[in-house]
Image (cartoon, grey):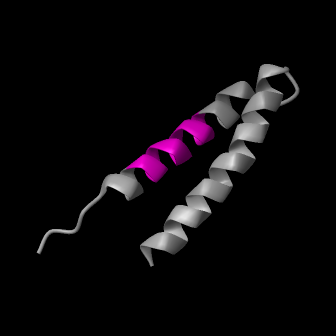
Amino acid sequence: MKLIFVLLTVIASVFLFYHYLLGLLHLESLLISGGLFFLTVFLLIRLLTWRQRN
């Protein structure tokens, strides 16, 4: 289950990185695309380092 969420966040990160680059070229809203890209990278790091406690 964790692998599915990691794959989904990686796919979302790639997609949002593309929109972030468009935002740097002033073709897309940088505030929204940058914020969402930061959020997905944060979630990806959180998913990779999160450990369940017994």
Name the residue rendered at 72%, 26% in the picture: 30
- Magenta stretch: dominant secondary structure: helix
Magenta segment includes 47? no
Whether residue 44 is in magenta: the answer is: yes
- Seen at 60% across and 41% down, the residue is 36
34 left or right, relative to 45: right
Residue positioned 22% across, 68% down in the render: 52
- In the displayed structure, 1 sits above or below 29; it is below
Q: Residue furthest right?
A: 27
Indicate the quadrant containing the C terminus: top left, top right, bottom left or bottom right.
bottom left
Pinpoint residue 43: horizontal percent, then vertical percent: 45, 50
Question: From the viewer's perspective, is 48 left or right of 34?
Answer: left
Q: Which residues are magenta?
A: 35-45
Task: Quadrant for the N terminus, please.
Answer: bottom left
* Residue toward you, 54 or 28: 54
Where residue 49 appears, x then y in whole percent? Answer: 32, 53
